[in-house]
Amino acid sequence: MTVAATATVMLFGTGIASGSAVSAAPATSQGDTGETSSLGGTQISTESEEAGPAQMASAAAEHAQLLGNATGEVKCVIKDNGCYQAFAQGALFFSPVTGAEPVVDKMWQQYRANGFENGSWGYPLDAPVTNEDGSVTQRFQGGVKEVAAPAPEPAPQPESETQPAPGGNTDNGQEQSPEPSSEASQEPSEAPSTQAPQPAPKPSPKPESKKPAPKPKPKPKPKKKDSKPKKSKKVSEDQLRKNIIKEARKGIGTRYVWGGTSPTKGWDCSGFTQYVYKKNGINIPRVSGAQRSAGKVVKASEAKPGDIIWVPGHVGIVSDKKGKMIDAGSRRTGTSERSYAWMVKRGAKFIRYI
């Protein structure tokens, strides 16, 4: 039996109403209960209603920086057993086929104009990706959609002059100080040898001359022990940064997979940074917004190789090549080493954990 009804649905507090008729075929899809909902058509099953909000909550935490604060509750009343939730910057959309993905800002405006999930775009397949030129692309069931880059603003231009100069550390040259060689020359003291001939003419009664010989020997030894730890501390920080860059470069070529954290199965931007840091004994949060909050913000001029560069929705690792970073950018670029000038123009922050 086919049920048909007409309902007016207000979406996300926008004031836009959809008055189209909704008809549902007999309950043949998984999760259909065969009961008529208040909006017409077939009512969504309890199982679908529980799966949708669970994935929506996870996606809301992942994309908190993009979405802003929630302005409505999760509602599982849209087509194909789908759910949505309104936020300050856009909304989250869920379907059992596509999962939960955000649509925000200008992409959200175009999506709304196209009729949301009921239009030709369908449901979103992944999160929006900001490209180097500032444009934004996002995959939907109806294809890849793009929003052009905003007009350049004059304010960020001076910031490009204060870009950090990774790889400019001069500590390595200072570490090789001549101090150890001067200390080593003090070890073979000739004082005992000058005292040795004195007891020679006097056969046995003067063994006491042998006692001062061991006294000067232990004195230079603690000096060596004091100097070594000072050098090792400097080397450990520099070496740690080198190790992070080395580990990050191993991941170049790895494919981009949203929500991924593996060099074999793929990773997203924050999954990549978390993996590299963990391989070097540093535990950082999973998502980009939390990585920015947990670390220490440093000036662009103070940034060093191995620090994290952040803008809302994206992170990368500062390279030892000036003006470049290593990051998992998008499905198109994968993991690569590229310029971060576009991030600086968008107000990038440099985050330190080392």
Image (tube, rainbow, N blue to C red):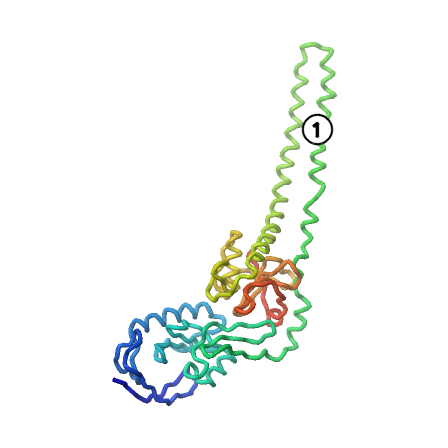
What amino acid does circle 1 point to? Pro
Q: Where residue 187 sits: x, y (%)?
A: 69, 30
Q: Where residue 207 sits: x, y (%)?
A: 66, 14
Q: In the displayed structure, does residue 305 sit left or right of residue 3?
A: right
In the depicted view, which residue is nearer to us: 308 or 201?
Answer: 308
Q: Quadrant of the C terminus?
A: bottom right
Location of residue 231 (image quadrant): top right
Q: Where residue 336 sits: x, y (%)?
A: 58, 63
* In the depicted structure, whether residue 325 falls above or below residue 88: above
Location of residue 75 (image quadrant): bottom left
In the depicted view, which residue is nearer to us: 94 or 187?
Answer: 94
Circle 1 SS class:
loop
Q: Which residue is mark 1?
A: 188
In the depicted view, which residue is nearer to us: 2 or 72?
Answer: 2
In the depicted view, which residue is nearer to us: 304 or 259?
Answer: 259
Q: In percent of the image, x 64 and y 33: which residue is there?
A: 221
Location of residue 306 (image quadrant): bottom right
Q: Quadrant of the N terminus?
A: bottom left
Q: Where residue 195 sits: x, y (%)?
A: 72, 19
Q: In percent of the image, x 64 and y 40: which residue is there?
A: 227
* In the depicted structure, whether residue 188 falls above or below residue 279: above
